[in-house]
Amino acid sequence: MRALIISGFLALSALAACQTPPPAPVPQPAPAPAPPPAAACPIVESRNWAAWVNRMPGPDARPMLHVTGEIDLPHAGYRVEVREGPADRSATPVQQIVLELTQRSGMHAQIVTTAMVAYQGPAIAQHYRGVRVMCGGQVVANITEVVDAH
């Protein structure tokens, strides 16, 4: 009997030694990237940017910087505000123009919508090296030619 128990034990030990180890855990896919923060710029595309300084003479006339362009937004539910940003301190500065886009409440058709952008403000320099249009901390456009309109 003892021989039978020992042979059974040896047979089970041999079977246990032949078993394959459990499969390695399957690696999980990386999580999807987080959506951009709310401060990110929603502009899909932009084009037709121009900048000029109006130096037309006249009573109480003073030079005015004008910047225009077009932006495409994901839908019509955005309000676009344009304000002057900082300029660098060089003799011929690059002026920043900042686009502030806020999403209005309510339902909006989910279709790409083009918005016209226009800025007008006092010229702070005799000549400009350029104008940089910013949105959500991102550069939307670099305008390298700022012409004078007389």
Image: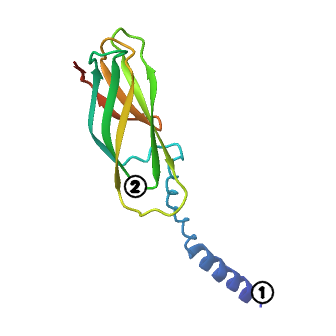
As drawn, the label of residue 2 is 1
From the top left corner, tell me how far across and down residue 85 is, in percent: 46, 26
Q: Quadrant of residue 139?
A: top left
From the top left corner, tell me how far across and down residue 142 is, in percent: 31, 30
Hey, what amino acid is under mark 2?
Pro
70 sits left or right of 84 in the view? left
| SS type, badge 2 | loop
Q: Residue at x 35, y 8 (%)?
A: 91
Q: Quadrant of residue 118?
A: top left
Hey, what amino acid is under mark 1?
Arg
Q: Which color scheme did the rendering employ for the protein?
A: rainbow
Does residue 140 sit above or below 144 in this rendering? Answer: below
Give me the C-alpha separation between circle 1 and circle 2: 83 Å
Q: Name the image quarter holding the N terminus.
A: bottom right
Q: Residue at x 28, y 21 (%)?
A: 54
From the top left corner, tell me how far across and down residue 150 is, in percent: 22, 18
Residue assigned mark 2 = 74
